[in-house]
Image (tube, rainbow, N blue to C red):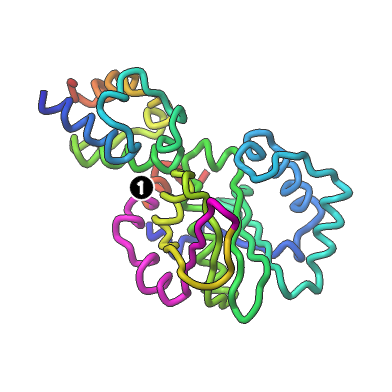
């Protein structure tokens, strides 16, 4: 199984979600096991969620994608502040995805979709200097420290990756692909 | 002794703790042993001992000592 072209994964822009899919995103995001990993752990109300979803329509500066694995909702990858093909990356994965040790795979798929399907040229972000979890995940995905661009808050480091680096390095990284393929094989298609 | 060294090395390299911190260490007790660290630890142990862990055992691998019990099922005595 080659994870980088895996048919197991499907993607849908938030602006195209059915009501049921949208509700599933809200419930997934409000799961305490998901909120504990977020910057803000507040519960999002149904009204706020609907306002947010409708605000995305006609907004050229944001792209939110719902990711499914084997037909099950697995997580969300997002880009904000989109301008000139460059965007601020973000993601969250469902509690089930985390339980099944698939976060790396789901985030990889989200980024791959942004670069290949949406044609994004650069993804950047900020990471806490002492957040070993985030630093390791970002390093595995090829996000490297950036010396220019948008500044991050104190105690944070700016990181970035270009589409070229993604296609030529991260998506070809034998060690990373082996790790992800192993988890895909262990999880099967259900 | 060689087996213990391989076992500990896998932890030190993937979870990012020193050997003296290993006894009693449990999953998610340190930021280095998160879900990604767990994946890396499992694949490193598979490579080090030439085994293929079952998903059930990977999910039950909840701590340093528990892992030794699980590996015993695969003929790995530590």
Instruction: Write the start and end of the magenta stretch as one range.
Output: A153-180
Q: How many marks?
A: 1
- Horizontal and vertical percent for residue A84? 62, 81
Q: Nearer the viewer, residue A74 or B63?
A: B63
Seen as rendered, the residue at the extreme left is B2
Circle 1 residue: A182
| Snapshot quadrant of residue A79 | bottom right
Look at 52% across and 36% down and name the residue there.
A99
Question: Where A41 sits versus A141, above or below?
Answer: above
Q: Quadrant of the N terminus of chain A?
A: bottom left
Judge whether B33 appears above or below A161 on screen.
above
Q: Looking at the image, is B17 positioned above or below residue B43? A: above
Picture residue at 52% right of the left edge, 53% below the top:
A127
| Tag 1 subunit | A
Residue A60 placement (x, y as % from top left) = 74, 75
Q: Is residue A81 left or right of residue A69?
A: right
């Amino acid at each position: 199984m080659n994870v980088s072209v895996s048919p197991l994964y499907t993607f849908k822009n938030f602006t195209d979600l059915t009501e049921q899919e949208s509700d599933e995103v809200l419930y997934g995001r409000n799961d305490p096991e998901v909120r504990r990993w977020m910057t803000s752990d507040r519960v999002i109300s149904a009204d706020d969620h609907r306002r947010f979803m409708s605000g995305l329509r006609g907004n050229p500066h944001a792209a939110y994608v719902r990711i499914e694995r084997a037909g099950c909702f697995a997580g969300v990858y997002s880009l904000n502040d989109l301008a000139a093909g460059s965007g601020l990356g973000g993601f969250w994965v469902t509690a089930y995805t985390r339980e099944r040790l698939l976060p790396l795979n789901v985030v990889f798929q989200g980024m791959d979709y942004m670069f290949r399907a949406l044609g994004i040229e650069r993804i950047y972000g900020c990471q806490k200097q002492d957040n070993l979890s985030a630093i390791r995940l970002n390093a595995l995905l090829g996000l490297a420290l950036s010396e220019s661009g948008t500044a991050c808050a104190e105690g944070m480091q700016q990181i970035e990756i270009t589409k070229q680096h993604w296609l030529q390095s991260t998506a070809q990284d034998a060690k990373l692909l082996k790790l992800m393929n192993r988890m895909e094989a262990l999880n099967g298609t259900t | 002794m060689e087996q213990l060294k391989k076992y500990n090395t896998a932890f030190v390299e993937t979870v990012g703790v020193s050997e003296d911190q290993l006894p009693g260490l449990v999953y998610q007790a340190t930021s280095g042993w998160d879900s990604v660290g767990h994946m890396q630890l499992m694949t490193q142990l598979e490579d080090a001992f030439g085994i293929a862990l079952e998903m059930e055992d990977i999910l039950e691998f909840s701590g340093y000592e528990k892992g030794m019990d699980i590996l015993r099922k695969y003929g790995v005595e530590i």
